[in-house]
Image: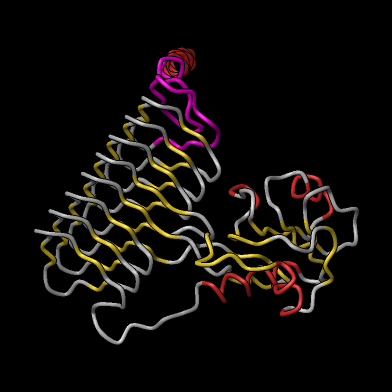
């Protein structure tokens, strides 16, 4: 998530009563979870076994709950509750803005785009040219939609991330500061739900076509020219390559990488990364040829047991 304007780290430290260590003159240009950080970003860490990962990451500013040695060129912001500070900063830069009409502020719509009745559009939304948005669609804040995009009835674009941190036995919600980006020539089926990222973007690549009742989790990235059939579920932060085909009711776990030109057959469950250029089937999903051999061997074994009985 990028800030509209860079913020001096000393200003952040003063505002939230944080102890500042390391570089004091740097500017924060954004805030992100650890897996999405870039130079200039703020991130946080509050579990010691992840200290090294955060301190050695691309992030320039780390909110942390222990006074440790600061790596060269970085800034530490020390506090007892890094998550709370991180969440407050996201809230500050992505505040809640309620909708009192069916069109939010700073809505931009391209030439020859048709929007049916009963479509709700949030704040700071951009829709390109030659798009068609059917009735009952919701498009949340900060969504960016390209050209020649079709969104069928009842789709929900840019809903909050399903993302919580357990604190003292209770789940505390992360503020969803990310966006949804839908590239050119995409089709979104009826009843789809696409969550925005927690701090980064959920991206649907150009030319991708999605059937009805598909759910795309927060921060997921779907490549170009993919086909996704009905009732597929893609968990948060998973990356799917270009030219992939996901048949009906495929489920994909979080934080995975699916290579280019992958086909996943119906009702398969994906729990680990998949190499590109292959067809997969089953739960846990494996190469289809091997899975079919396993099924044939199991059927043969069962038939023999039944005959012996």
Is residue 271 within the magenta segment?
A: yes
Front residue of this view, candidates 4 and 309: 4
- Residue at the far front in the pictured view: 25
Residue toward you, 207 or 215? 207
Q: Nearer the viewer, residue 98 or 278?
A: 98
Is residue 62 shown in magenta? Answer: no
Residue 156 lies, with reference to residue 71, above or below; the image says below
Disc tally is 0
Q: Residue at position x 30%, y 87% from top?
A: 100
When asked about the image quadrant of residue 206, the answer is top left
What percent of the width, then of the height, locates residue 78? Answer: 82, 67
Q: Residue at x 55, y 33 (%)?
A: 272
Give the x, y percent position of residue 93: 54, 72
Residue 268 is situated, as x and y percent measured from the top left of the image, at 41, 35
Residue at image coords 32%, 36%: 224
Q: Position of residue 47 (x, y in %)?
A: 80, 56
Seen from this angle, which residue lies furthest bottom?
100
Q: How is the image coloured?
A: secondary structure
Q: Where on the picture, by quarter, is residue 112?
A: bottom left
Question: Looking at the picture, does residue 205 appear above or below residue 158?
Answer: above
Q: Which residues are magenta?
A: 268-292
Determine the residue positioned at 22% across, 64% down. 154
**Nearer to me, 282 or 294:** 282
């Amino acid at each position: 998530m990028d800030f509209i304007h860079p913020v001096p780290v000393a200003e952040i430290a003063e505002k939230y009563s944080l102890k500042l260590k390391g570089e004091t003159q740097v500017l924060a240009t954004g805030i992100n979870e650890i897996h999405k950080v870039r130079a200039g970003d703020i991130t946080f860490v509050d579990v010691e076994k992840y200290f090294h990962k955060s301190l050695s990451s691309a992030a320039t500013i780390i909110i942390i709950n222990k006074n440790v040695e600061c790596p060269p060129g970085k800034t530490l912001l020390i506090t007892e509750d890094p998550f709370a500070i991180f969440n407050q900063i996201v809230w500050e830069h992505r505040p809640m803005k309620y909708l009192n009409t069916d069109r939010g502020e700073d809505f931009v719509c391209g030439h020859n785009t048709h929007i049916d009745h009963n479509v709700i559009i949030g704040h700071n939304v951009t829709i390109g040219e030659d798009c068609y948005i059917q009735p009952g669609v919701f498009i949340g804040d900060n969504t960016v939609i390209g050209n020649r995009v079709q969104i069928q009835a009842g789709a929900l674009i840019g809903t909050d991330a399903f993302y919580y941190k357990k604190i003292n036995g209770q789940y505390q919600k992360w503020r969803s500061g990310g966006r949804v980006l839908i590239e050119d020539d995409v089709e979104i089926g009826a009843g789809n739900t696409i969550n925005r990222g927690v701090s980064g973007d959920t991206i649907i690549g150009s030319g991708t076509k999605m059937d009805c009742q598909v759910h795309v989790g927060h921060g997921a990235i779907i490549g170009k020219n993919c086909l996704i059939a009905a009732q597929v579920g893609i968990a948060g932060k998973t990356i799917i390559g270009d030219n992939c085909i996901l048949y009906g009711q495929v489920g994909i776990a979080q934080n995975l990488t699916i290579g280019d030109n992958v086909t996943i057959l119906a009702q398969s469950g994906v729990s680990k990364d998949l190499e590109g250029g292959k067809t997969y089937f089953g739960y846990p999903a494996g190469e289809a040829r091997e899975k079919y051999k396993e099924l044939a061997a199991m059927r043969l074994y069962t038939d023999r047991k039944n005959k012996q009985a």
